[in-house]
Amino acid sequence: MAAERNQKLRSANRAQLTKLFQRASSLMSDEPSVENVETLDLTYELIEEKMDYLKTLDERILSKLSDEKMEDGVAEADEFMFSAKEKLRCIRKHKENIQSEERRSEPSISNAPTPSHDPPRSNMKRNYRLPKLILSRFDGNLLQWPAFNDDFVSAIDENETLSTIEKFQFLRAQLDGEPFSTIAGLQLTANNYENAKELLRERYGQTHKIINAFMRALWELPRPDEDIKSLRFFYDRIETFIRGLSSLGKEEQSYGELLIPMILDKLPANTRRQIARAHGNNEWSIANLRTTLKSEIDALQAGEIDGFNQEKSYRPTAAFFTNSNTKKTTNKPKRKLKCAFCKNEHSSITCPVVSEQEKRFEIAKRDNLCFNCLTPNHTSRKCLSKFRCRSCNGKHHTALHAKQNSEPSAPQKAREPPAVEHAASTFTQGAKNQRNVVLLKTAIVEVSNKQTPFQLSATSGVLFDEGATRSFITEELVHKLQLQPTHSEEINLSVFGMDCKQPQTFDIITISLKTTSKEFVDINAVVVPEISAPLHNLVTRRTGNLSHLRNLRLAHTPSDDRSPFSSLC
């Protein structure tokens, strides 16, 4: 099935590439103009992306061919790609000729016309080479809809040089996740372009829904810390949301009185005292509060030592790694993380925007990135980085590791020695062998990410280790909560019973755990692929009636299920 689908995909994309070449040929035969040149540039970029994707499809198809068909398959793929590259070279030469003509046509200072003979400005043709326009993408976040819609309408929808089919292609290319699924079933026709826009407007473009999203985001802003970076982020988010509401016709006077106590309550006590001292006993308005808060942040920044980050050092709460050495940097400028796939500030491994392995490989190939370190201008063969994949220790980046869910066959499982299993109770989860059962401390806890606008939360199974010095969290839970690493540490791993050490670099995140008293406790945790295999629940009603367990509140009800654990404290 996969081979047939790849063949169909290749045929469809080759047909579309042929249409793009025809479009480019028509544009090159027309009289050069600003509009034609811009449309040709867009067509050229689409052709390059199509050719990159076709290369990937060719590799997949050829890898599945038998030895007898391999030679013919390679020859056919090379012949098509050679023809495409010849056409692409002609387009590139045409573009270069236009650019050289524009440079020659620019008047020099000595030959500039005198002021009395200047032609009217309205009749002058301007051929400026503007920087490349990058359209924003939309993944279903209502807060991003107004900006995305404005960008798309001005750059694509109102561009008269583009056909309706091309506009539809651009629209689909800028959507991710749920919005893409919303219009995925529509065929690529002119009528369906209008239907697609209407579907998106109905789901994401309703003004009252966007206003509610902005108000909720304001109300759920995470509390800032005392440091300048956290306060600046808090202030910038307030300004962004208020500007968004203003663009929708919601003036700050209509909700400012409700917002003032919320902002003051979230501010650190010291910052609240400082702005109260500056403002005196006068009544607050939302405009005055924002101005005063900005002045306080500017004053704090002016008094900070340039180039140094004075960050709080959080003590880790627990860990199961023994004999681990960590490297920490102090009084050094903090290097910002930048995702190689979506260019946002988070780890490439936990990128929530580009999560599919195939798309990550396509982006790495398109941007000429090294598969081992994800930096440009060299290949993995010439990469000097000492780091390897954390999952298989291969010479590729962990973000490009292909996850496999293969399980051993039944005969192999039968030959394996009995595995140690662990079972579950609130405080207890058991590990059994052939002779007895050992109960382990566990809990079901609500964990959340306070840094997101809606404070994402999830239920996590926690396994306790009272002798540990660190906490751990699985990559799956980090991705689910969209957690971003605060920094990285190099840890020497020692396997139990072995004398060897393997230094590896791990991301560190901060997560909030909800206690039984409804309070949230922040802890630092090391991000690892997994903590343990799903543990067998051995808790029964008979177990719960034992005298030393009778008064304990159990997290797991008696069952025969296997419980996965995503945190260890």
Image: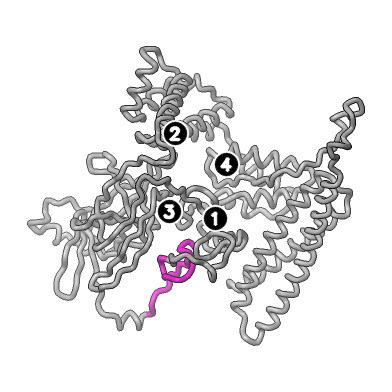
Quadrant occupied by the C terminus: bottom left
Residue depicted at 54% across the width and 50% down the height: 343
Q: Amino acid at mark 4?
A: Arg
Dot 4 or dot 2, earlier in sequence:
4
Residue pointed to by mark 4: 203
Q: Are marks 1 and 4 in contact (CB under 8 Å)?
A: no
Q: Nearer the viewer, residue 537 or 500?
A: 500
Q: CA distance from mark 4 to mark 2?
A: 33 Å
Q: Is residue 294 above or below residue 305?
A: above
Q: CA distance from mark 1 to mark 4?
A: 27 Å
Q: Nearer the viewer, residue 535 or 68?
A: 68
Q: Amino acid at mark 2?
A: Arg
Whether the magenta-drawn stretch holds residue 565 is answered as no
Prevailing secondary structure class for the magenta stretch in the rendered image: loop
Residue pointed to by mark 1: 341
Q: How many badges with numbers are in the image?
A: 4
**Rendering quarter of residue 125:** top right
Residues in magenta, as a range: 390-409
Q: Is residue 371 left or right of residue 132?
A: left
Q: Nearer the viewer, residue 410 or 284?
A: 284
Q: Amino acid at mark 3?
A: His
Q: Nearer the viewer, mark 3 or mark 4?
A: 3
Secondary element at image label 4: helix
Q: Nearer the viewer, mark 4 or mark 2?
A: 2
Dot 1 or dot 3, earlier in sequence:
1
Residue depicted at 53% across the width and 39% down the height: 142
Residue 232 is tagged as 2
Dot 1 or dot 4, earlier in sequence:
4
**Rendering quarter of residue 207:** top right
Residue pointed to by mark 3: 479
Point out the residue furthest to the left here: 547
Whether the magenta-drawn stretch holds residue 405 is answered as yes
